[in-house]
Image (cartoon, rainbow, N blue to C red):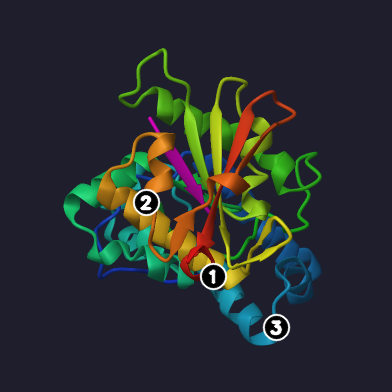
Amino acid sequence: MLQAIISPAKQMRIAQDAFAPQGIPPFPTATERLRQELLRIEREQGADGLKDLWRVNDKLLNQNIERLHGLTSVLDEGQLDEPDVARALSAAAFSYVGIQYQSLAPEVLDLDALSWLQDHLWILSGFYGCARPFDAVQPYRLEMGAKLSLDGARDLYAFWGGRIADAIESAAMHGDTTETEPTLIVNLASVEYAKAVLPYTALTTQIVTCVFGEDLRGEKPVQRATASKIARGSMVRWMAEQHIERAEDLARFNIGYRYAPELCYERQLKTGAREQTLVFLREELCA
C-alpha cells in the first residue's frame, strides 16, 4: 500500500472542534523520553537552554515553555478515554497550523478521503517520530534538525534511527498490497524531515519524491519554500480525493502545476533503494 510522508508545522493548536483522535503515535515511550529530556534541559540550563535548542524569540520561548509544562504523558491508547487527557489532545492532521495544512484542508474532506488519509499518510515529527492523521498529539516544539543529543545519539536522526522507516514500511505491508508489490513511499516532506526516513528504507522499497518548480534555471527546477508547502498540501488533498494507489498515477496531478517528464530523474540511495524524482512545473511555464 502506498504511504505518503509530509513534514509537520511549527505552529500547532488543540483542535477540539475537529474529529476525535483514534489512537496514539507508534512510539510513546520514545516521546516520553524526549519530554523528560526537555524538562531536564530547562531544569539544568534554564530557559536559555531551551531557547538555544528551539531557536526562538522570547515570545515563542515563553509560549513553548508553557506548552512543555502542559504536555501530558500518554503511553497507552486507553488514556484517551480520560477527560483530563482528552482535553489536551487532538488529531494530528487538524493540530498542525501552517500553509501546507491550510492547503491540505482536512476539515473539508469527505469521510472517504479522510479514510484514505488515515491509511496512507504519515506526518513526520521530531517529537513523535511519525503520526497518522488521526493519532492524538499535543502542541510541542522540537524540530527534527534540532541539535539535541541523548542516550548516546548525536542528534534526533540518530535517536530515531530506522524506527520511523520501519513503522511506515510495516504499515504498507499490512495494507492491501500483495506480497509481490514493493512498498511505495511518496515523499512530500522537506529535506530536513525526509532525512529521517529515506536513509533507512529497505532495499526493495520504491521511493517517489515530488518536486514543484516555480521557474527553470538551465534544465533544473527552481523551488521556493512557501510555494512548495502549498503544492505539497494540495497534492496530498488531491491524492486523498482521487484515492491514489500507484506511482504512475501521480503524474496526473494538475492543480496549478503540470508534470514535466523530461526533467524527472532517478538515483540509487546508499541503502540500495531506488528514488525516482517527479518534477512538476508551474502551469505558466508549460504554456
Q: Is residue 52 visible?
A: yes
Residue 71, given in percent of the width and then of the height, sits at 50, 62
Query: What main secondary structure does the magenta stretch of the protein show?
Result: strand
Most foreground residue, 113 or 29? 113
- The quadrant the N terminus occupies is top left
Earlier residue among tags 1 and 2: 2
Q: Is residue 8 visible?
A: no
Residue 92 position by quadrant? bottom left
Residue where numbered disc 1 is placed: 227
- Given the image, on which type of amino acid does mark 2 rest? Pro
Residue 246, given in percent of the width and then of the height, sits at 38, 34
Residue 10, given in percent of the width and then of the height, sits at 56, 68
Most foreground residue, 4 or 24? 4
Q: In this view, does 169 lie above or below 279?
A: above
Q: Is residue 233 above or below residue 152?
A: below
In the displayed structure image, the side of residue 60 where residue 47 appears, left or right: right
Question: What is the C-alpha distance between the residues marked 2 and 3?
Answer: 29 Å
Q: Is mark 2 on a helix, strand or loop?
A: loop
What segment carries the magenta color?
Answer: 1-6
In the displayed structure image, the side of residue 274 where residue 106 appears, left or right: left
Most foreground residue, 192 or 33? 192
Question: What is the C-alpha distance between the residues marked 1 and 2?
Answer: 22 Å
- Given the image, on which type of amino acid does mark 3 rest? Asn
